[in-house]
Amino acid sequence: MKTQTYFIESFGCQMNQSDSERIAGQLESLGYVHCDQHGNADIIVINTCCVRESAESRIWGHIGALKHIKEQNPATIIIIAGCMAQKDQQSIFRRAPHVNIVLGTQNIDRLADILQDAQPKKKLLESGMFDDDGLGQEAGQKKHQGISAWIPIMYGCDNYCSYCIVPYVRGSERSRPFDMVLAEAQAFARAGGQEITLLGQNVNSYGKNLPDNWNFPRLLQKIDREAGIPRIRFMTSHPKDFGAELIEVMASGKNICEHLHLPVQSGCDEILQRMNRHYSTETYRRHIGQLRSAIPDISITTDIIVGFPGETDEMFEQTLAFMAEIKFDAAFTFLYSKRSGTPAATMEEQIPLAIKKSRLKRLMDLQNSISLAANQYWVGKSVEVLADGPSKTDPSVFSGRTRQNKIVLWPATPADFPGNTRLLQIMSAQTFLLRGEAVVERKD
Ligand code: SAH
Ligand code: SF4
Ligand code: F3S
């Protein structure tokens, strides 16, 4: 019998990537084998994101393009999973009748059951959306392979930032018991894993539903001491729940990487309040000060939204000034996108697209110059780099990351292989990367 194959395309954040691994795990347990091209696959999964309208439009395009694959091979099973599937179940079936299964974010672990049911019938099938029972989150995890893995520690979000759709499509916060997280990290370490990223929409509120006063700093410390993983990362942190206990654990930990992603979203207090973020620029500034004095070489990255409803030129200038003051290593910058059902969508004074775009450009220009200066700090220093593999565009160049999560490129040598950790000297810096040379091979 011909081997049955599956193809998965993932959009959105790391949480979706991690969910895709769970989907893949279930498909493999049913005997499907991964393939790289959707044209040949028996099952095609699109794992969707709806955080911004731009993501959604792109995904609609991809869903539409699958129609002719289905026409050529009607037996292909098309599955739309993830956040947009959660939000738009009915309209996906209506607009794209070639889709077989729409799988909500909280039904991922039922895929195997649904499929076994769907296959003989070959008909549209709904997956019973959004039970929010918190159960079944552990099934079908694909065994982590390779160098780096994402490990979810919590699902959902209770923060309801006024612009954000995520709480509506991912449900309320549920934390995984610490022993499951630890066991998963330890198993990955035994399989040769070098780096994990603990994942959650707001990792700092880990443990709220768990017994025994579990919180994120305690979990992180336990993983640091007992997982046997040399590089531990985590994201995303929320400034309102960030504080001294976590800084202390980060500073004293051996394997915790010197990098923090702490989205500030805006440098204007009035906007932060309207975003329902529950902190001020002053609190944020204080966190960064404490963090930098505890861990001098830490890199700090952030997310910024421009053009939130009611953002005046003056308020935007405050964001620019805040960026110039804090000097982030990097920032992910977004045009505010109206998400219906969120409070910000009905706020007055929506900002015209042209203004949003010109603000975004100014912000990016400023940040690029700050990122370049932050990278130049590393020139002449020796850094520990975890090798990812040869560069995709030039195989004579190897690529890896520092503990600060900066990309480093260096001339490949026979000693280089993915997963190897080596010491490199940084020779030059660009806005988005560093260039290095192997310290041992220098002959000066
Ligand atoms: N839970 C994480 C990530 C959420 S989504 C956090 O709180 O940081 C990632 C980023 O997308 C957010 O930090 C925010 O900057 C951006 N984002 C979310 N909703 C958005 C919207 N409606 N328009 C533009 N950007 C948005
Ligand atoms: Fe969205 Fe805010 Fe939750 Fe992040 S913390 S997922 S921005 S609601
Ligand atoms: Fe997108 Fe869902 Fe992540 S909306 S950003 S994939 S949580």
Image (spheres, rainbow, N blue to C red):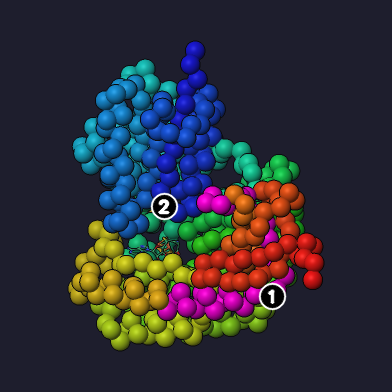
297 on left or right of 98 = right
The reply to whether discs 2 and 1 touch (Cβ–Cβ < 8 Å) is no
Dot 1: element: loop
* Residue bounds of the magenta highlight: 366-394
357 on left or right of 38 = left
Asked whether 113 or 172 is in front, the reply is 113
Q: CA distance from mark 2 to mark 1?
A: 36 Å
Residue 403 falls within the magenta-colored stretch: no
The residue at which mark 2 appears reads as: 12
Asked whether residue 216 is in view, the answer is no
Residue 380 falls within the magenta-colored stretch: yes
Asked whether 388 or 84 is in front, the reply is 388
Asked whether residue 200 is in view, the answer is yes
The amino acid type found where label 2 is placed reads Gly
* Ligand 2 shown in quarter: bottom left
Q: Is residue 321 above or below residue 170?
A: below
304 on left or right of 25 = left
Dot 2: element: loop
Seen at 27% across and 30% down, the residue is 68
Asked whether 208 or 259 is in front, the reply is 259
275 on left or right of 140 = left
